[in-house]
Image (spheres, rainbow, N blue to C red):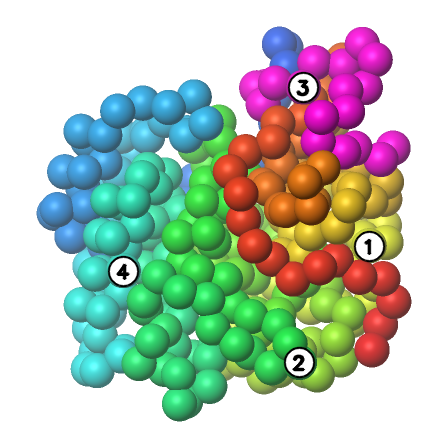
Amino acid sequence: MRLKPGCETPGVDQRPQAAAGVKRPGFPVRLSPDAGLPSATRRALGTRATDDLKPPQSKAALAGLQQPMPAGVGLDSQTVRSRMVEKLARQGVRDALVLAAMGRVERHRFVDTALANQAYEDTSLPIGLGQTISKPNVVARMLELLRQGNEDRLGRVLEIGTGCGYQAAVLSHLASEVYSIERLRGLHDRARENLRQFRLANVHLLFGDGMQGFAKGAPYAAIIAAAGGEAIPPAWIEQLALGGRLVAPMQTAGGQQALVVIDKTAQGIRQAVLEAVHFVPLKSGTV
């Protein structure tokens, strides 16, 4: 099934909402992040207006965020990450677990040393081989959309485009299991090196063609992609669990890219085209 913006599938509702009677796959263990959020961020979460594209906050999740993050110095310090998280909250990110996960992962460890001082700015940065690490706001926004409607961990998640491994590290705090596939051998090896120090037992890095997904790990509660093509590959839809959600950039009719949210329901596929984004193009094969 090839889904393109502006092209409706007969008999298929394309609104980004959960199907009646279908519960999105989850994981029965509640995530208790040991990363804290500054008081300004907690106040922002408590007062921001609701939005049907943003998940509600659970009292249990917010309570868990009051635990302190490990202290440090320089770029390793709690203060640097807390400032980034505060900015994400001001920009509209409301999911408490996403904000906590973003605050736990040290983004500067995934970029070149020469760019480390820019690691917590809201900007994309080159990671080699013509690829980039996405802006923190874009990462948080996509993860928030992926988690919409879930108060607990997601189940098994497939990430298309490992890159330097940063998003996989953040996902490790939001999902029971993460399969991340990369088509560029140089980046796959770099991600393995970057993630080794974190000892994330629930993250599995794969070298292969992301357009084919990873059938052996299917079905997935969620699929997220860091590259956009003219259409969503059929393999991704096939490997998505019933009740699962897919978030990916996709080329629009005007040649630009936009975020697309796809829900797989008992009634069919629901698709919504959201804001404009800019990602590297989706390609097949391995290099």
Q: CA distance from mark 4 to mark 3?
A: 34 Å
Q: Is residue 96 visible?
A: no
- Mark 1 vs mark 2: in front: 2
Mark 1–mark 2 contact, CB under 8 Å?
no
Residue 89 in percent (x, y) is at 27, 45
What is the three-letter code of the residue carrying label 3?
Gln
Taking the view exactly as shown, the residue that stands out farthest to the bottom is 114
Q: Which residues are magenta?
A: 1-18
Residue placed under numbered mark 1 in the picture? 211
Residue placed under numbered mark 2 in the picture? 129
Q: Secondary structure at mark 1?
A: helix
Q: Residue at x 32, y 29 (%)?
A: 58
Which quarter of the image is occupied by the C terminus? bottom right
Dot placed on the residue nearer the N-terminal end, 2 or 4: 4
What is the three-letter code of the residue carrying label 1?
Met
- Mark 2 vs mark 4: in front: 2
Dot placed on the residue nearer the N-terminal end, 3 or 1: 3
Q: Quadrant of residue 190?
A: bottom right
Q: Main secondary structure of the magenta part?
A: loop
Badge count: 4
Residue placed under numbered mark 4 in the picture? 84
What is the three-letter code of the residue carrying label 2?
Leu
Relative depth, front residue between 118 and 93: 118
Q: Which mark is residue 14?
A: 3
Is 114 left or right of 166, judged from the image as shown?
left
